[in-house]
Image (cartoon, rainbow, N blue to C red):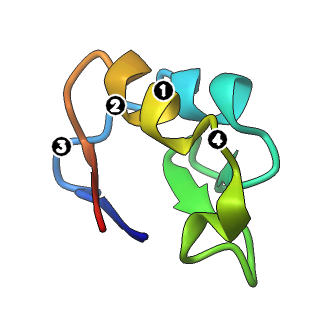
Amino acid sequence: MHIDIDRGVCIGAGQCALAAPGVFTQDDDGFSELLPGREHGAGDPMVREAARACPVGAITTSG
């Protein structure tokens, strides 16, 4: 699975990190980022839910 975070759209709501904490975290400014080694979701079933939970649609998945 490919995960893309549009940092120009992200508002730092943190819903992705709450939904899939094994894949997403927040940087020092509060914006979403992928954990090292989790760039492809690492089989986490909550990745798509994290994308749906984003209030501004900054996360997209494919594959």
Q: Which mark is residue 9?
A: 3
Q: Which residue: 54% across, 43% down?
A: 47
Indicate the amino acid at tag 3. Val
Of the two numbered discs 4 and 1 in the rendering, the one whose residue sits closer to the viewer:
4
Could you tell me residue 62's position as x and y percent?
26, 62
Q: Secondary structure at mark 4?
A: loop
Q: How crowded is the residue under tag 3: few (<14 C-alpha within 10 Å), some, or many (20+)?
A: few
Indicate the amino acid at tag 4. Pro
**Looking at the image, do the residues carrying marks 4 and 2 touch, with CB atoms under 8 Å apart?**
no
Q: CA distance from mark 4 to mark 1?
A: 8 Å
Q: CA distance from mark 1 to mark 2?
A: 18 Å
Q: CA distance from mark 1 to mark 3?
A: 18 Å
Mark 2 or mark 4, which is nearer the start of the sequence?
Answer: 2
Q: Which mark is residue 61?
A: none
Q: Secondary structure at mark 2?
A: loop
Using the image, determine if residue 24 lies above or below residue 20.
below
